Amino acid sequence: MKKKILLIAVLFMVTLLTGCGSKEKVVIYTSMEEERNQKLTEMVKKEFPELNVVIQHMATGNSAAKIKNEGTNVEADIVIDLETAHMKDIQKNFADLSKFDSSFYMDGVNTSSNYLTWVKYTMNLIIDNKYFKEHNLSVPKTYEDLLKPEYKDLIAMPDPKTSGTGYGFYLNVVNIMGEDKAIEYFKKLKGNLREYTTSGSGPTNLLKQGEIAIAMGMTAQGVEAINAGYDFSIVELETGSPYNTTSCGIIKGRETNKNVEKVFNWLIKDFGKYDKENYMPDKILKEQENKMKNYPENLKDANMTGIDSTETKEKLIEKWGEVNG
């Protein structure tokens, strides 16, 4: 009798293990930040308990390089939050998404049938209100204003070579002034900078530490600091807010998998909407609400011609060497 009970127990455990192992797997490469990835993991488990959805974080450059190298043999089925310039460069590895409903996007947001825009994120100045008041400083309104001597050692900017945010500011100045004048401008600005930071979040972190008074950073990160209690303001220059976009897609050949199809459809319609409304509120959907407190409304797009071109970026990054040369 004991042997029979033991045998039944063993068979039950084997059945359980076999059931877990037989779950179909869908692999998602994501370049989102940790908090957003955690929310995705939480929501996808609730939505698809019958699937083994693997969320794998990968920096946007690394993800693009891996797909470029491995092509359609890459492990990922779905890729989200990949910088659009990279997505455009490797789009031949992605499936045609024409069968997916994208009517919920604002007109003109999507320009390719091989990928859809994931988020748009803007960049602006973030200033320390207390420091400005105590030192009776005027709020900068133009890029030229940042060259004023009273701002010496009070500004931090992300390095365009290592940060998409830094590159966004750089490209905007190039589009306004032209390449040569832009390089001369940044040579002058360097005299007022406390430092170039490696990451896009670096200037905002220095601002929070009280080491600078003006951060050239992502709008969302500045608003997060304000909502955490910091006495900061978001300042949009007269030329508008620089911006960039990320995109999402399905690796070619995986679009015929019904599980991949339903996960991707949920991502763009449900989780994607949640992600934009709560973390990246710059509007790209027709019915997108802004649920991030204190996020500025009616920001004006800066001239970002070439933001989706890796060719332009490579050329400008090479020219950037003249600023430090």
Image (spheres, rainbow, N blue to C red):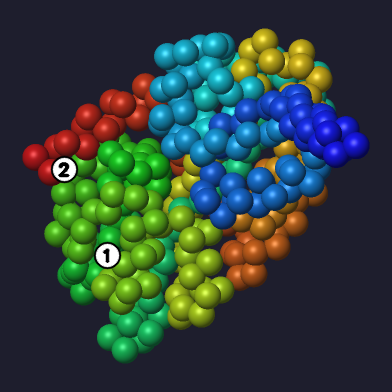
Residue bearing the label numbered 1: 155
Q: Can residue 26 be seen by looking at this rendering?
A: yes
Q: Quadrant of the N terminus?
A: top right
Which of the 4 image quadrants contains residue 62? Answer: top left
Taking the image as shown, residue 144 lies to the left or right of residue 149, namely right
Q: Can residue 172 be seen by looking at this rendering?
A: no
Q: Amino acid at mark 1?
A: Ile
Badge 2 or badge 1: first in the primary sequence? 1
Which of the 4 image quadrants contains residue 133? Answer: bottom left
Identify which residue, 187 or 253, lies in the foreground. 253
Local SS, label 1? strand
Q: Quadrant of the C terminus?
A: top left
The numbered dot on residue 289 is none
Q: Residue at x 66, y 46 (%)?
A: 41
Residue bearing the label numbered 2: 323
Extreme front residue here? 1
Q: CA distance from mark 2 to mark 1?
A: 16 Å
Image coords of residue 54 (percent x, y): 63, 34
Q: Is residue 178 above or below residue 78?
A: below
> Could you tell me how many numbered marks the image carries?
2
Image coords of residue 270 (percent x, y): 78, 43
Image coords of residue 249 (percent x, y): 64, 25
Identify which residue, 5 or 41, lies in the foreground. 5
Q: Amino acid at mark 2?
A: Val
Q: Residue at x 38, y 51 (%)?
A: 200
Taking the image as shown, residue 56 lies to the left or right of residue 237, namely right
Image coords of residue 282 (percent x, y): 62, 51
Taking the image as shown, residue 76 lies to the left or right of residue 191, namely right
